Amino acid sequence: MTVDEVIGGIEDGTMIVVDVREPRELAAGMIPGSVAMPLSEFDPAGLPVDDGRRIVFVCAGGVRSRIAIEAARQAGIDVREHLAPGFKGWVAQGGAVALPT
């Protein structure tokens, strides 16, 4: 997915972003409202699948988010989307950034 598509999905409430970067990366900022699930501890059972929003994975550059998609699919969760340019692309295109809580 593109940055604009994810911004639109967040704004209209149809998407939730799951950030699979590691804690040291998250400390630099996250997409506002995203959920942190570092890939090193990733458990698809913890994904927020019950609220009706589409899950979109994000990592730094798009590689780990694809790994998370595959792990979720192997666990029987139909997740297909990730932010293709990653968090770096999000920041480069002016996406909002929040500090983790």
Image (cartoon, helix red, strand yellow):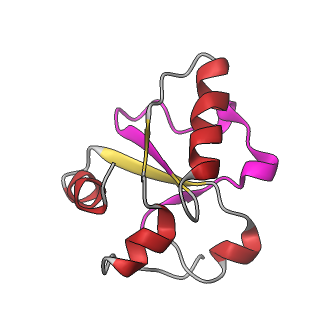
Q: Nearer the viewer, residue 50 or 99?
A: 99
69 displayed left or right of 51: right
Which portion, as a residue range, is magenta? 32-57
47 over 30 or under it: above or below: above
| Residue 35 is one of the magenta-drawn residues | yes
Residue 39 position within the rendered picture, expressed as x and y whole percent measured from the top left? 73, 50
The C terminus sits in image quarter: bottom right
- Residue at position x 29%, y 56% from top? 10
| Residue 51 is one of the magenta-drawn residues | yes
70 over 26 or under it: above or below: above
11 over 26 or under it: above or below: above
**Quarter occupied by residue 67:** top right
Specify whether residue 96 is in view. Answer: no
Tell which residue pokes out farthest to the top in this image: 76
- Residue at position x 54%, y 82% from top? 99
- Residue at position x 48%, y 60% from top? 34
**Quarter occupied by residue 27:** bottom right
Residue 81 position within the rendered picture, expressed as x and y whole percent measured from the top left? 42, 39
Residue 49 position within the rendered picture, expressed as x and y whole percent measured from the top left? 48, 32
63 displayed left or right of 43: left
82 displayed left or right of 44: left
